[in-house]
Image (cartoon, rainbow, N blue to C red):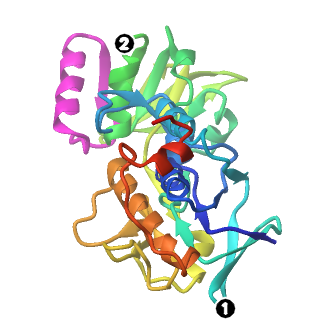
Amino acid sequence: MKKTDALIIGAGPTGLFTAHQLKLIGLDCEVVDNLDKIGGQCIELYPDKPIYDIPAVPECTGEELTNNLINQLKPFDIKFHLNERVDEVKRDDDNWFVKTNSGKTFLTPNVIIAGGVGSFEPRKFPPKECEKFENKSLFYSVKDKKKFEGKTISIFGGGDSALDWAVELSKTSKVNLVHRRDEFRGAQATVDKIKELKNAGKIQLFTKYQLVDVKGSSQLENIDIKHDDGEIKNLKTDYVLGFFGLIMQLGPIADWGLNIDKKTIKVDTEKFETNQKGIYAVGDICTYPGKLKLILSGFHEGALAARACFKLARPNEKYRFEFTTTSSKLLKRLGKKE
């Protein structure tokens, strides 16, 4: 059994920055994630998608953000346990006993849930034939946009992801954008851009259509889309992308005795502690009045939760807030000289 000052569940951006904050104040921590790589949703769902709302970073991709956060952790020795799902969390005197699906066990006074939206999978196309082409020429996320260069891509969906990728991929590819309604759910500025690209002949737009069939042998060759009035169009296409949102599942978290509200966990705004002492929730999985589901909000939440962990991990020591710009102790932990 591994003993640690804090265990973080989730290796996405919020979990990574929380780990940084814990190590900065002198606490040990380990990180568990059920994905096979560090980065959470940023890596799994949109590694190549531009992100524009990280303070002081005008633009970066999910992969670039993840790599920068990993580089920020280099001064510290943090153990990551990937491909591990936390199945059991139960009280053991003043600590929490934590067990993963592979049998790894931890004993810690602090558990920080930074699991994004819990376990998730994309909503998929209804036609059964789509399964034949999944992860070959039909995808529900973009992990390498270079493979689409010079190809014809049919993008389905009406939210931010579908619109953002239609705009981005139209720079190097022929794009068909298909949506089952006339109205879009994405940001108005992006909707306006889509209309501008349509008028310029850069995007073909099909509204009130849905996918009814995909055709091809080993490689996708064309698709049938059906209008609300029954009309069917056949589109030649090399790739199909579907962006219909995610099916969110809390999984084992639902059984840990936490105050759950609509698949999110209620927390206070002082320590981001749940109704269970020593269990915190930060990032998209937590909720409180005024909550914004932004990465920068997760960073703020993780910083406060990390400092709350100090009291339980070091009950005989007093935490003293210090700035990295002036503290020789913090600079030393970061491997910097004064």
Residue in the image at 26% along x and 10% along y? 201
Q: Position of residue 170 (x, y in %)?
A: 36, 16
User: Could you say which is closer to the camera, residue 154 or residue 25?
Assistant: 25
Q: Is residue 14 above or below residue 68?
A: below
Q: Which residues are magenta?
A: 179-206
Q: Earlier in the sequence, mark 1 or mark 2?
A: 1
Q: Residue extending furthest bottom?
A: 93
Tell me if residue 197 is in the magenta stretch: yes
Q: Is residue 322 above or below residue 152?
A: below
Inspect this view and state whether residue 199 appears: yes
Q: Secondary structure at mark 1?
A: loop
- Left or right: 157 as drawn, with respect to 77: left
Q: Position of residue 284 (x, y in %)?
A: 41, 59
Q: Position of residue 245 (x, y in %)?
A: 43, 50
Residue in the image at 54% along x and 33% along y? 67
Q: Disc 2 marks which residue?
A: 171
Q: Disc 1 marks which residue?
A: 93
How would you rate the neighbour count of disc 2 (Cα within 10 Å): few for under 14, some for 14-19, many for 20 or more?
few
Q: Amino acid at mark 2?
A: Lys
Name the front one of labels 1 and 2: 1
User: Could you say which is closer to the camera, residue 212 or residue 50?
Assistant: 50
Residue in the image at 68% along x and 68% along y? 4
| Labels 1 and 2 touching (C-beta < 8 A) | no
Q: Amino acid at mark 1?
A: Asp
Q: Position of residue 12 (x, y in %)?
A: 53, 49
